[in-house]
Amino acid sequence: MAIPKEMGGSGSGANPEQLFAAGYAACLHSALNAVARAQKVDVGDSSVGGRVQIGPNGEGGFQLAVLLEVVIPNLGYDEAQALADAAHKVCPYSNATRGNIDVTITVSED
């Protein structure tokens, strides 16, 4: 573990924000697969990547923001976005953070 460079650390190891990003991406991907199964939609080649940003909260502490990228190659944008939105509603990480931090979910083609 290492403190991120943005916070004055060496950045020479994993940090809690990276672990949170990996956990959130994995959780959203599991939710995406569950929603797709229920709707009988094939998302076999899908993936979810995550990035967490950290910055000052204006009160002497720090706050997080999460960026998640969903890729579902065999679906059109609208259907992929609908599945991603549905997954965001059931994902435990999404439900735990909703209203507490900014979460942006982007659907991209690759």
Image: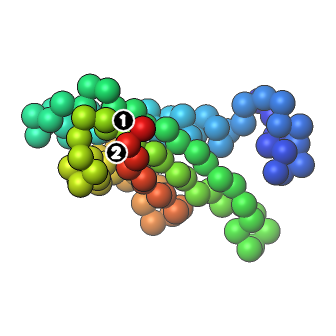
Badge 1 density bin: few <14, some 14–19, many ≥20, Cα 10 Å: many
Observer able to see residue 83: no
Count of all numbered marks drawn on residues in the image = 2
Q: Tell whether 76 sits left or right of 61.
A: left
**Residue 49 placement (x, y as % from top left):** 49, 38
**Farthest bottom residue in view:** 58
Nearer to us: label 2 or label 1: 1
Screen quadrant of the C terminus: top left
Q: What residue does disc 2 label?
A: 91
The residues bearing labels 2 and 1 have C-alpha atoms spaced at a distance of 9 Å
Q: What residue does disc 1 label?
A: 29
Mark 2: which secondary structure?
loop
Mark 1: which secondary structure?
helix
**Residue 109 placement (x, y as % from top left):** 38, 43
Q: Earlier in the sequence, mark 2 or mark 1?
A: 1
Q: Tell whether 86 sits left or right of 66.
A: left
**Residue 34 placement (x, y as % from top left):** 22, 34
* Disc 2 + disc 1, Cβ < 8 Å: no
Q: Amino acid at mark 1?
A: His
Tell me which residue sits at (72%, 31%) in the image.
14
Tell me which residue sits at (65%, 43%) in the image.
17
Tell me which residue sits at (82%, 51%) in the image.
6
**Farthest top residue in view:** 44
Q: Reply above or below: 2 against 91.
A: above
